[in-house]
Amino acid sequence: MAEAKLKSFISMQQTMRHTDPKSAANVSLKDMANAIRALAMDAVERANSGHPGMPMGMADVATVLFTQYLKFDPKHPNWPDRDRFILSAGHGSMLQYALLYLTGYEDMTLDDLKHFRQWGSKTAGHPEYGHATGIETTTGPLGQGLANAVGMALAERMLAARFGETVDHYTYTIAGDGCLMEGISQEAISLAGHLKLNKLIVLWDDNKISIDGPTSLTVSEDTPMRFKSAGWNVQSIDGHNAEAIGKAIAAAQKSDKPSLIACRTKIGFGAPTKENSEKCHGSPLGKAEIEGARQKLGWAHGDFDIPSAILNAWREAGARGGKTYLEWTKYYNAANVTKREEFERLLRRELPSGWTEALDNFKKKLAEAQPNEATRKSSENTLNILTGVIPELIGGSADLTGSNNTKTSHQSPVSSENYKGSYIYYGVREHAMGAVMNGLALHGGFIPYGGTFLVFTDYCRPAIRLSALMQQRVIYVMTHDSIGLGEDGPTHQPVEHLASLRAIPNLQVFRPADATETLECWALALASQNAPSILSLSRQNLPSLRKEYTKENLCARGGYVLSPSSSGLTRGSRADGDPSVKPKDDVTLIATGSEVMIAIEAQKLLANKGIAARVVSLPCWELFELQPQSYRDEVLGKNTLKVAIEAAGGFGWERYIGTDGIFIGMHSFGASAPAKDLYKHFGITAEDTVKAVMNHPALVAGSGTKHTGKL
């Protein structure tokens, strides 16, 4: 009986792969495509801003896809087994907005189209995830959407391997010439071909036009051959021939490889003088051109006027997925209860029960063992616990697995033969890795993390920025985080990277000081459902600084007093001998990561000189800034000399140390030498810190004693 139900369900799924739309009014596909063109022209013209050419050129392709092949249901837009559609060429956003309105998504209205690119509108200049249902990802930076699609297609294959026929859908993306020019595209298509993601179909808008003019100005390679060499199935068609479009999509669905359909189109199709020209790429057509286009297309209707027969035909096409949704729901509800509950937990993005207890037990062991190890190793040890209890954790590295320490004993590699794996060897593809992780997170069902060196966040930065913009729980494990990596030299030693990453809104940048802080930062990254995280980890060994177990996650507030000063050393009590005077610290030493141990050493040296100093560990500025001002004042202290210690550039530290504080760190690029020699050369030592403190005018003036500054 179960087998018969499965066969029936699979047959229904296959039928949904191609349906021939026949509306009551027998509206042609040409009329339906022209509705897209008209809405794109009108919306861009009203906004006096936008890109009408691409929607007009790809209207025929999109019409065939959405009316005959795409599996979706506007009434259930978050249906887990819907096909995913990504507009990688995000500048053509009116194509997507028009499709959402025409097919009947309730939260995309005609009024929304009329307010294209206006304040508060869902119809932003480029599609933005979360603004309206049906928008699967934020696109605009060219090539990112294509790489997101690779992540979504991979997520589909991996979920199908875990949950069977409950998951069986395609990922479609429309990409333009610009998407394929960007370097990220090569990384993405190479990875997709290697993993044989056969449910990925790329529709290339092959119009041979970019903003500067004909692509012949800049491109001469054989693009279809480029995809073939990466292991893709490739077809080339007339992008304005509905029959050819349909046959190509049907063939692509049957391929055992990812598919590229090169759709030869005319940008601005229908525009009388601007068709096939860059003049319709990034600016409104103008009223006269629009009037000419209406005549040429045979569209005798006013602005934003879609005749009821055409709109009804589109709505019928949108409704065709309702039956498939109901059949899928019946099959899903009859599935194994345990698997169904697990599937639903993943879709809710909830972590499994027991993970915090497992982590807490390991935290107790760290307090006992007091390991002396690099935080990249601490991260690996923590991950070994986490990957054992959180099956949706999907790891990876850009060819630095042994250096990033991102693979654990619980993980097997993901491959075209093993989609049940949980570790992705991304190869030297940092650009694609970040964007693929975004696709995995957006699809749902997985929590991705991936590693490289902190200096190479430069390669990942566009994807990191989009992770933050889309509020996705993506975790970037970035090791070798300072000059402490040593001999590889300044090309590999990040100096400005922490400051640049901290400048990205909604990105948590963690720089833990020891094994316990590393564990706590991992816990915070996993608990942050609406923000990505950077884990900035050391290559060199660091001592344990947290000497006792605390159930409380001290890193959760971003910063805390790790080592209070000895009250007997405060100048307040020393000055008048009155025990009722509340002790006051002379100095607050603030540090992150590997430099916290330097602060601890400096605290001891200052104590020997009669200077009271507290040590503040500040592993996450972003979380610290969320705390009440009273807490921040309590941690940093008032009327104390603030000293920041970080083996990176000092940009941004003024918010904590003020204009009169001291920064101990980097003021140039690094150099190639052993780590200890570098720290000494660049003056990032406990002794250098003490010398700077002792010579500081504010401390000398406030102490009543003239310090010599000698160590």
Image: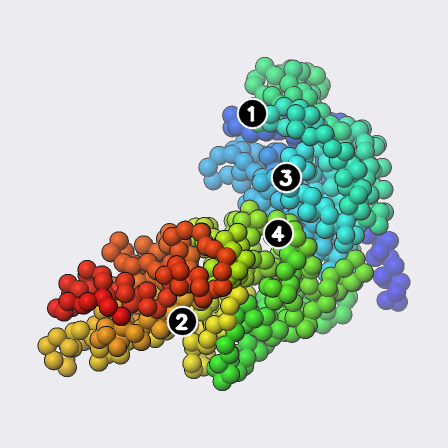
**Between 460 and 159, which is closer to the camera in this rendering?**
460
* C-alpha separation, residue under disc 2 versus residue under disc 3: 43 Å
Inspect the image, locate mark 2, and give the three-letter code of the amino acid beneath it.
Met
Give the labeled residue for mark 1: 283
Q: Earlier in the sequence, mark 4 or mark 1?
A: 1
Query: According to the image, label 4 marks what residue?
Result: 430
The picture quadrant where one finds residue 614 is bottom left
Q: Earlier in the sequence, mark 3 or mark 1?
A: 3
Q: Position of residue 142 (x, y in %)?
A: 61, 39
Neighbour class for label 3 at 10 Å: few (<14), some, many (≥20)?
A: some
**CA–CA distance between discs 3 and 1?**
22 Å
Residue 202 seen in the current view: yes
Q: How many marks?
A: 4
The type of residue carrying mark 4 is Glu
Q: Nearer the viewer, residue 575 or 470?
A: 575
Work out which residue is located at the far left of the displayed protein and give it: 576
Residue at 56% over, 71% down? 377
Which of marks 1 and 2 precedes in the sequence?
1
Is 567 placed above or below 414 here? Answer: below
Q: Is 695 displayed left or right of 441 in the figure?
A: left
Tell me the residue at 60%/75% (across/down).
385
In the visual, does 674 lie left or right of 608? Answer: right
